[in-house]
Image (cartoon, helix red, strand yellow):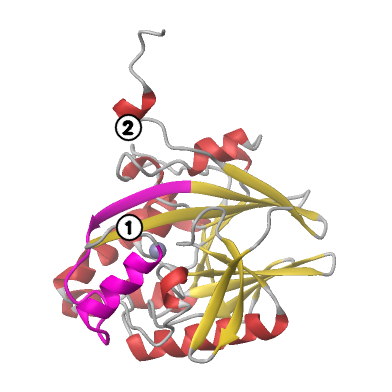
Amino acid sequence: MSDKTPAAETGAHIPAGHYCFKLGDWQVMALHEGVTSRERPENFVRNASEDEVESAFVRIGLPAGQLSLTFTTLAIDTGRNLILIDTGFGENGEATTGRSMANLAAAGYDASQVSAVLISHFHGDHITGLLRKDGTPAFPNADVHVPGPEWDFWMDDARMAAAPAAQQRTFILARKVFGALGARVKTFQWDEEVLDGIRSVRADGHTPGQSAFDIRSGGERMMAVADITNNPLIFARFPHWQAQFDMDGDRAVQTRRRILGEAAREKTLLYFYHAPFPALAYVAEREDGYEYFPALWR
Ligand SMILES: [Zn+2]
């Protein structure tokens, strides 16, 4: 017997991991960032009853009354570049988060090798990890590519002044993070080839400027769809549901149906930021929504 306190008791240990697979000529790595759980806010889905929402959560095995979330970031080694899509919380989140960098290291890479970070939108779970706890860049050699429409919204001082309290912290966080990164930050527009083989796709509604990414290499394709759903096991099945976190609920529903509909028709491999690890799946159309199929590991 070891006299060390078991990791399970300290809460220090979070299970695996990282999952690597080939997309064409590229090596892609899903990196588990962590999990959070808290009481589900009242009216979490604006246009469904508490009973409907509770039964949808419980049906897939989630704890009653809770909002449990999981986070997965994505790294891509193109042979020339190491690209990261969204950062997670890094050193600045709850103890059950911030695992992406340890998992990147487990895959054999170092944060200093990251040459580009692509950001889907400016919510804290996606950008907080751009800085270390001491405020210095977590990826010292990376350019940080952000959606122009997202930048225009969150960096607008008049909008910040007029925003409800719940949104203030995102305005403040965006100023802190991107202020510290200065000229490393580059904006891109929707439908632009941000990097070779990676095109941005309009995905607004969750936030005003969210971008998905259409990723192609060697004749293979996948889409990083960020937060077009909260938990996709729920919101693919009920695509018309408007979660509290969707700033423009109607637009979020339109975006969800457009991207999931196309992915269902074209059998596109999807990476959802809030799906169970390794967060890779296919969807298929059903009467009033989409069925979610975890992708087989390969
Ligand atoms: Zn998110």
Check residue 11 in the rendering and tell me which mark sits there, or answer none: 2
Q: Nearer the viewer, residue 210 or 284?
A: 284
Q: How many marks?
A: 2
**In the depicted structure, whether residue 60 falls above or below residue 51:** above
**In the depicted structure, whether residue 97 falls above or below residue 227:** above
Secondary structure, mark 2, is loop
Q: Nearer the viewer, residue 175 or 122?
A: 122
Judged left or right of residue 73, residue 123 is left
Residue displayed at 33% across by 86% down? 249
Residue displayed at 22% across by 78% down? 51
Callout 2 crowding tier (Cα within 10 Å): few <14, some 14–19, many ≥20:
few
The quarter of the image that holds ligand 1 is bottom left
Query: Label 2 to label 1, Cα distance in Å?
Result: 17 Å
| Residue 109 found in image quarter | top right
Residue displayed at 84% across by 69% down? 219
Residue 110 showing in the rendered view: no
The segment highlighted magenta reads: 33-60
Percent across and percent down for residue 133 are 34, 39
Disc 1 target residue: 68
In the rendered image, residue 42 lying in the magenta stretch gets the answer: yes
